[in-house]
Image: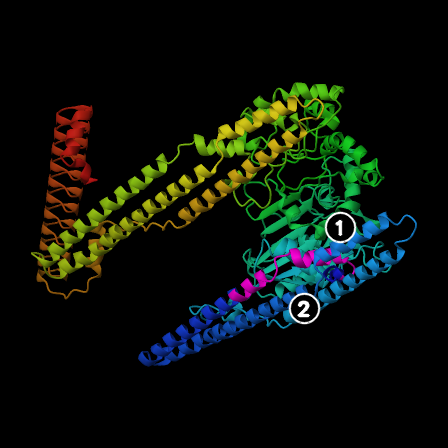
Amino acid sequence: MKETRVMNFTVLPPEINSARMYAGAGPAPMLAAAAAWDGLAADLQASAVSFESVASCLVTSWQGAASTAMTAAAAPYLAWLSAAAQHAEQTAGQARMAASTFEAALTATVHPAMVGVNRTQLVSLIASNLLGQNAPAIAATEAEYEQMWAQNVAAMSGYYSNASAVASRLTPWQQLMDGLSTTGAGPAAMAPGTALVMGTAFLQPTPSYVSRIDQLFIAPFHPGYLAQGLYTPEQYWPLTGLTSLTVGQSMVQSAKVLNDAIMTQNGNPTLVFGYSQSASVASLEMQHLLTLPAGQRPTADQLSFVLAANPNRPNGGFLERFHGLYIPILDLPFFGATPANAYPTTDYAIQYDFQADFPQYPLNLLADANAVAGQFYIHSSYPDLTPAQIATGVVQPVSPADTMTKYILIPTHDLPLLNPLRAVPILGNPLADLVQPDLRVLVELGYDRTAYQDVPTPAGLFPQFDPLTVAGQLVEGPGRAYTTPWPTWDCRRRDSRNCPDPVQCYPPERLRDGLPKPSPTSRRFRRFRRRATRLVAAVGNNPRELRGARRLLGYRGVRGLKTSSDKADNDEFRHLAPEINSTRMFSGAGLGPMLAASAAWDGVAAELGSAATSFEALTAGLAGGTWLGAASAAMLGAAAPYAAWLQATASDAEQAAAQARSAVSAFEAAQPATVHPAIIAGNRSQLLSLVMSNLFGQNAPAIALAEAEYEQMWAQDVTAMLGYHLSASAAVAQLPPWQELPQRLADMADSAIASWQLPNINIGTGNTGSFNIGNNNTGNFNIGSNNIGNANIGNANLGSFNLGFDNVGNFNAGWNNYVNANVGTRNVGQFNIGFENTGDANVGIWNVGFRNVGFVNVGEGLVGFARPGDGDVGVTSVFERLGAAAWY
C-alpha cells in the first residue's frame, strides 16, 4: 500500500502530474536545505578545529596521568565532530542532487497550459461532431493526449527513481557522544530507552504496525525511546483458531514474556505499549511487579506504560465492570483493574469502545447495544487514528493522590449504533442525524463522566440524573446539534452553583456547522426566532445563559473542551472565545502591577547593593586598621559569606526587575494585537440582526461573512495571547534561583574562631584554648576567669564578646544579662539598655515588652513610666525614627 501511494503518478492523468510539478514549491526548499546543511557542516568543522586546538594547548601545559586521561576522553568527541561535519557535507550534496533531479523532471514534464489546450480542443471537436466529420481530428487529439500522459509518467518515473537513489545514499548519523564531564557511565548512560510494542490477539507487531504506534502514541509524548516489536502469544480461542490458546492461557504466557523482556533491560529506561489484550497483559505484569520487593523491580523512573483500548481500565474497562466473573468455556477471567499510580501510565480509550468504555449501568440496553457496535466499528481503529484526533482527547479526572496515571478519552462524533443506518444510501445519513441527538442523551445515561477514572468502578444498577434536564434535552431533539456529553473538567458539575469560575466552566463557544435553515413556516423556525432574541444575554457571563447558548442556534459547542494536548491551565486561551480573551486583556490591571514590581525590585537591588558596599567597607576598615591578629582574620572570614550573599542577592534583584520589565514589554505588544471588545460586540450584534431578519435565507452570504470575520478575530486573539504567554513564560523561566540566607554573623564568628587553628598560647592556669589570660577560661581570646566562649572580658561569662560577669549570650556589657547585645544588669532578651528589662529593645528600668522607653512599662512602643498596653502611633513613629526599627 505504501508503494502504491508513492507511485500513483503512473495512473494519474497529465493534468494532475503537470499541475503538481509546476504548482509546487519547486527546487527552492531543497536548495535552502542544502545551504542549511552546508552551514551546519561549516559550524561543526569549526567546532572540531577549535576543540582540537584547545586540547592541544592543554597537553603542552598540563602533563601527567590526568592530562592523558582527559585527552583520551576528548578524542571520541573530536572524532564525532569531524564525522558529523562530513555527514552534513554529504547531506548537502544529496540535497543539491535532488534539486537537480527535480529541475530535469520539470523540464521533461508537459506544461499544464498545453494539456489544457488539448482538452479544450477535444471538447470543441466533440461538440461540433454532429455527423462524425471530426472523428479523425478527435483521434489525433486523443493520441496527442496519450503522448502527454506517457511523457509525464516517464518524467515522474525518472524523478522518483533518481530521488529515491539520492535518499538511499544518505549516510546514517552517528549516535551523539556523552558529555565530557560524564565519567564511569559510558555510552550506555545516554543510550535511548526501549519501547516494547505488543500487539493484540488479531494483530501481531509487524514493522508497519510498530512504526504507526510509535508515530501516534510514543514519539510525540515520550521522545528518546526506540520502538521495537515484542511478540507475545496473545490468542483468543476459538476466534483465533480451534487449536489456539485460550484467553487465560495466552495472557499468562504473554505476561511471562513481557516480564522477561523488562528484566533484561537491566534498569535502562523502558516503555511498554499494550493494545487491547496486550493492555491486559501489561496490567497483569504491573500487578506482578508490585508483589516483588522494591529492590527486585524497576523503579518509576525506569519503567512506564502506554495503554490503548484497555479492557482493565479502572472506570470503563469491560473486565473491571464485572470483576470476579469467570467464563469457563472461554477461560476468560475478569481479573480487575489496572493498578493506578504504580508506574507512569497513559491510558487511551475511544468513546463507546466496548472494551475500554463499557457502560457503568448495563441496564441501559441502548448504551449496551451502542458499546457492542463500538466493538466492531471502534475497537480496531486505534492504529488508524490521526494526531489531530488524539489531540482532541479529554484528560479525565483522577483522585488527588494519583500523580502518575493519566486517562485520555478520545471523543466519538457519531454513535456506533447508527453506523448501519448511515450505510443506507441517500436517506441513511439524514435519518441518523435526525435521531442521534436524542439517542446520545439516552446512551449517555449509562455513563458517569465526572467520576474519578483511577478508582475501580464495577457495574451499577441505576444512574443518578435530573429528569427535568433530560426531558429538556429530549424535547430539543433534532434541533440541537451534537454537543459534548460531559462538562469541562475544571467544573465537576453541570450546575453552576458550585463552579468557581463560570466563564471558565461555561465558555461562550463558537458556531461550528452553520446556522439551521428550517422552513419559514415551520414551528421549529418560529421557536428559533424566539430563542434568537436571547442571544445577546446568552453571550454574557451568566452561567445559566451561557449553558443555554450552546444550543440556542443549533451550533456545536466543542471549543471549550480541554484536550490531552493542554499542558497546563495557563494556556486555556487557546480554547476561549475572543469575547473572553479580549475582555481579559482590556479590563485587567494592565501594566501597573508589573511596573510597580519592577520598580520595587530595583529598589531592593539598590538597597542590597548599598548594604553590601557599606558592609565591605566596614569590615575592611576593621581588619586593616585598629583590629589586627588572628581574631580579626577570623571575623573577616566569617563576614565574607554575608557580603557575598548581599552582592549576589542584589544581582538577583536586578535580574528580577529586568524580567518584570520584559513582561511589561510582552503585555504592551499583546494588547494592541488583541481585538478590542467593542469590535467583537459589534460583530455579534450584526450577526444577531442578520439571523433574526433571515426569513427566506437572503442573508446567508452576509451571515457567512460575519462568521468569517469572527473567525479572524478568534485567530488574532489566540495569536496575540500565545505570543504574550510565550514571552511571559520565558521571562519567568529566566528568573535566577535565590540563594539561601547565610547564618547570623555571631554564629559565623563562633564557628570561624572554633575552626581556626590557633597555637596554644595561654597566660594563667587551667585555661583551655588559645590566647587566654587568667584562670580556668575555655575558648579563645578570653581575659579574666571562668569564661566559656570567645573574646570575653570579665568573669563567668558564657558566650562570646561579653564584657562584665555572669553574662549569658553574645555581645553583652554588664552583669547577669541573658541572650544577646544587652547593656546593663539583669536584662533578659536582646538590645536592652538599663537593668532588669524583659523583652527586646527596651531602654530604662523594669520594662516588659518591646521598644519601651522609661521604666515599669508593660507593652510595646511605650514612652514614660508605668504605662500598660501599646504605645501611641506618634510615639512609636518617633521611636522608629530614632532607629529602633533598624535593630531588627
Q: Which residues are magenta?
A: 10-35
Percent of width and height locating residue 516? 70, 28
Numbered label attached to residue 164: 2
Name the element at disc 2: helix
Residue 215: which quarter of the image? bottom right
Magenta-span inclusion, residue 59: no
From the viewer's side, name the closer residue of 754 and 236.
Answer: 236
Instruction: Mark 2: give few (<14), some (14-19) or many (20+) Cα within 10 Å.
Output: few
Q: Residue at x 47, y 44 (%)?
A: 723
Q: Where's the C terminus, which quadrant?
A: top left
Q: Is residue 81 above or below residue 334?
A: below
Instruction: Give the CA separation, mark 1 to mark 2.
Output: 33 Å
Q: Earlier in the sequence, mark 1 or mark 2?
A: 2
From the viewer's side, name the closer residue of 220 and 305.
Answer: 220
Numbered label attached to residue 565: none
Q: Is residue 235 above or below residue 674?
A: below
Horizontally, is 579 left or right of 517 in the view?
Answer: left
Percent of width and height locating residue 816? 13, 42
Q: Amino acid at mark 2?
A: Ser
Magenta-span inclusion, residue 22: yes
Is residue 200 in view?
Answer: no
Secondary structure mostly seen in magenta is helix
